[in-house]
Every structure is written in structure tokens, then in C-alpha cells.
Image (cartoon, helix red, strand yellow):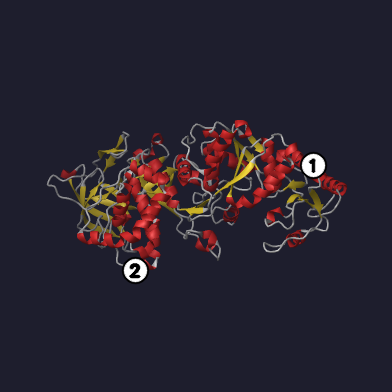
Amino acid sequence: MSETAPSTPGRDFIRDMVERDLAAGRHGGRVVTRFPPEPNGYLHIGHAKSICLNFGLALEYGGTCHLRLDDTNPETEEQEYVEAIQAGVRWLGFDWGENFFHASDYFERLFDFAVELIRRDKAYVDSLNEDEIRDYRGTVTEPGRNSPYRDRTVAENLDLFHRMRAGEFADGAHVLRAKIDMSSPNMKMRDPLLYRIKRATHYHRGDAWCIYPFYDFAHPLSDAIEGITHSLCTLEFENNREIYDWLVDALVESLPFPDPPRQTEFARLNLTYTLMSKRKLLELVERRLVAGWDDPRLPTLAGLRRRGFTPEAIRDFCERIGVAKANSTVDVTLLEHCQREDLNPQVPRVLCVLRPLKLVIENYPEGQVEELDAPFYPHDVPKEGSRKVPFSRVLYIERDDFAENPPKGFHRLSPGREVRLRYAYFIRCESIVKDPATDEIVELRCTYDPATRGGSAPDGRKVPGTLHWVSAEHSVPVEVRLYDRLFKVERPDLEEGGFESVLNPGSLETLTASRLEPAAVDPSLGDRLQFERQGYFYRAPVDSTSGHLVFNRIVPLRDSWAQEVQKQSPAAAAPAPAQKAKPPKETEAKPLEPLTAEEQEQLEQIRPTLLPIVQGVLAAHPTEVERYRSGKTGILGFLVAQVMKQAGPAGKANPKLVNVLLTEKLSGS
């Protein structure tokens, strides 16, 4: 397996179980896990949790992890999905070596196991149709009834099952069922179905078979065939554990290993603002509501990869959320935070204007070009490197960085106002040029102060804002795709009207006229860059050509979604809080300004309400607490966001006061 996989184990109940088994000498000291997806769709980030767990355990305990395709349903499985599964596991940093298997390669052995159950009078051929089987099964409050075919003789069952295998019967004419207990409180144990007749070409076995085992039959016996020691499943399979144990116990004498595997369940990953069901993801793809399984808005590994997410960030995310016994929903902002924290100390910073507005410096000499020094990394990133940024008379700035009639608190450029151009000079807007047909602003006329080169004035005067820019003559046209959350609500799977009604129409914005500084085109800088003041971006290899560069936004510099949700809520009508300073970089938190007397009084008033929330957030995020205390104080912003979200509008939480409470608790006071 790949050396890039995480090597620091986290403590959880599954690792405790493995260590108990090793101490007791179970399975001869072996640790063999497996990741067993069905090839009926692409892997998503929920699978990443299982991949990291199963392959991670094998790495930590010197064992092996198998990649096995549970391919027992020929109608939904395809070779495309097989290749996507393999690519996804490898991209995450894991490798199965020689341990790649198909459950369909065990069809002959599984058939023999079924025959053995019939001979022991533990299985029978049932001729009820699908509706009758459902009716006979009973309900959660009423026991089931025995099928009229349950008492067929062993000889009759063997004959019928072999004729099913030979293709003598139509689809649905018969099924093979385990003979267990039709009155079991666990409805999964009411004579579960083991085999059905299904005439369909299998992507791997072709037309060799016309009967196929059900998952509940193939899964435990495939584990047993391969010598799996720890069969780890998500909680939706908890009720299936009895079938698992019943089958391996019933056939233990015929299995290749004396100590049969046991199934253990852990909580599946649910993520806000997306869907984690392959069936629903397939519906999105088939209805063309997205651009395919690798659409960058999807939680599929292929989609995350195409958007620009790194496998390191996803492994970090899976480690942070941990392994638990109870299902919960994880805020997608944690995934985005992990990605920012992975990219922040690595990627170069460059200038890109997404929505250009032309700016002419009237007192700058025509034809003159200066090359200004600009570092690739900020002072708190321990990497070196710089480039020359061309500066000329005609520039582009962000259209959003200019306001003809600026609102209160607007600190960027407006008529008569002076601002700083990043790495360059102070400029002042003298006039504007509008399109006479549309009244749209198409050009700004400005002047610059030659004495302010480098961004400071000899006379000590200050300016309210710093803008990024590019030279009109030297910048490179690029296409930028701004990806956002696919759904407008946290849990689209719970919407009564269906998830289509809550699709986010702004989940993709394509900008075709963006301008990038020339140095950023150099491929030696890497495929991932930070566009200053914008976010982290990925040079899309699938969509870019030599003459047409395309960049996907991976994540913005900070979470703006919570602000947008707040705007749309009834609480948005309340007076806006005072203008807050820009969030600090993730590696170092900016010191807070001292509380005013009024803020100190407010803090004491809300302390009893917020303190339990603060304590709960810290308890729920031990990894983040540890990182903060190790010096990565920038993570405080993530913790503040979690407290603010739980407090809600009713909590009237001021971020500054939340920050103070968190800092107190984190420092142990």
C-alpha cells in the first residue's frame, strides 16, 4: 500500500477491538480488512471514510486490505464503474497490491455453499412471487408465515436449484431462501433470499450464469473465502449482521479458515449541502442535472479530484471526523477548512482579476512598463520565491472593487478616494466613463502618486483598502469556474418535494473574461494556486488547452455561505453589526482588539448561554483543539463558526465575544 497514506492512528472502538483480538491471538495474529464496493456508481467522500479506515487499519497493524467488487447484480454494474473505483482508491493514496477480487469470481464456490445448505435442510426453493413473499414476511409488529413451499424435501430442493442453474425456469419463477425463522423479531432473518433467477449479461462473467446470489449471501461468504478478519460495514447493515453470522456459522466446516470473520458496524458519513446516496447521485447524472459523475459540484471522488481537492485534505478530513457508533451529519465547512489548511502552506499566491474593469492611470507615462517585485508566499509561510509583475498605464481591477456611490463601510475605490494597488502605488479615482447605451461603467480614470511605490507614502498618510490588479497589456485571458454548493439547504435528502426543488442555481458561475498575471501561467508553479483575495484555484487538466486555460475554484479563502444564509433568514432584517476586520490567515490568528466596556457587559450577560455551546464545540472537535494549542491559532475561526451556527439567530452571538470565550477555554481559564 502507498506510503502516502496516514500513519498516525487515531483511537476508536474499532482499533480497540483489533488490539483485543491481537492480544487474544485471534485469527492467528492476522489483520485482513477489505473495501467491498458494488460497481454500480462512482465512489464518493462517504466511501473515502471507509477506504481510509480499512486500508489505514491494515497499514497500522502490518496487515493487508483487499479491494473486492461485490458484483452480484448484473443489471446495474459496469466496467466503467470498476475502473473509476480503482482510480479513486489509488488517488486517495492506497494500493491493494495483489489483493484485487471480484465476488463474481466466487460464483461456483457460492453455488456449492448454497447446495451444502440445502443438503443440511437449511435452505429451500420457494415458488412464491415477489408480492406473495412480501405479504408472507409479515410486519414489524406481526410475525411472518411459512411459505407453502418451505417443507419441500431436500431432494426436491436440490433438483429445483440445479434446474434453476441450468436455465430451465423464467425470471422470478423461483428463489432460494434460507430456512431460519419466520417469526424472528429481526425481519432480515425471516427466511432471507439467497438466490434469484436473472437473465442478464454480467460485465465480468458474461452469460455464464442465469442465477445470481443476493448481497446478504455473497458478502459474508466472500469475506470467509478471502480470510477477512475484520468485516467493517456502515450502520445501515446492522440488522444484516445476524444473517452474516448465521451463514458463516452454518458453513464453518466448509470454510477455508477455522476462525470465521465477524461484522462490525460504524457510522456512515453524512455531509451537509449534498447527497450521499449513489442512487440519487445516479439520478442527478442521468437527468443531466449535473455534467456527469465527475462534475466538480458532486461529492464523488472523481468530482472532488476534478475540482482540485487534494487527497491529503480528504484523508485529513476523514481522520478528523473519526470513527463512531452513532450516525451524525458533518458540516461541509470542515472539509473546506481541511482543504485550505492543506493548501495554505504550499501554493504560490498570484494576481487574477475575475471580473475586469478597465483602469487608466492618466499621469503614468504612455508606453512605460515597470516590473514590480512580488513574493509568491506571505511572511508566515516558510517558503521562498518571487516574480516580476508588469505594471503599465492601463490596468484591470475587480469590478466589485469600485462603487460609484459607495455604501457605508466600503473601503475600496470610489470617485475621489485613494487606495493602494498591491505591490505598486497609491491611486486616486478622478472620473468614470460609462457606456452611453447602457449607463454601465466601462472605464475608470485615475492618477497615481509616484512617491508611493511599494505601497507606502513618505508623508505617512493611510489608505482604506488594497486592491489586486493586472496589466491589461501583459495579462493572460483565462476562463474561471466558480463552483459552490449544489444545494441551497443543508439536508436536501429530507426535502419533501424532492431534491430538484432545492438545487442551487448559483452552484456554477463561468467567467470567460478573467485576466491572470503572466507569471502564473508557468506550469512549474504547480496546478494549484491562490488567487489573492479570491480563493484557491486549480488549473483544470481536463478542460484546459495550450491556448485556453481553465481554472476551477476549489474553495474560497473563507466561508461566505453562512453569510448568504444569514442574509436570507428573517434575522437579516436586524441592524448589521459593526464592520469586522478581515479574518486572519489560518496559520496565525490576529489578536483581538480589547473589549469595550459595553462589550464586556454584554459578554457577562451571554456567558451562561454561550458557555455550554462553547464547551460542546470544543469537545466535538478535539483535533482542532490540539492544533490550536500546538500553535495553529488560525483554526480559531473554524471553531467560532461552529459556535455561531449552534447559537443561531436566537443566541445573538457576537463573533468577537465568541472568540473571547473560546480563547478563555482553550487557554484553560
Front residue of this view, candidates 647 and 369:
647
- Residue under pointer 2: 573
Circle 2: element type: helix
488 sits left or right of 635 in the view: right
**Label 1 Cα crowd, 10 Å radius (few <14 / some 14-19 / many 20+):** some
For the residue marked with disc 1, what is the amino acid?
Glu
> Hey, which quadrant is residue 252 in on the image?
top right
For the residue marked with disc 2, what is the amino acid?
Ala
Residue at x 57%, y 55% (from the top left corner): 284
Front residue of this view, candidates 35 and 32:
32
193 sits left or right of 629 in the view: right
> Hey, which quadrant is residue 340 in on the image?
top left
The spot of residue 460 in percent (x, y) is 13, 47
Name the mark nearer the viewer: 2 or 1: 1
Label 2 and label 1: CA atoms lie apart by 71 Å
Q: Please give the label number shown on residue 389.
A: none
> Hey, which quadrant is residue 68 in on the image?
top right
- Residue under pointer 1: 116
Q: Is residue 272 above or below residue 452?
A: below
Residue at x 15%, y 50% (from the top left corner): 461
Q: Are marks 2 and 1 in contact (CB under 8 Å)?
A: no
Circle 1: element type: helix
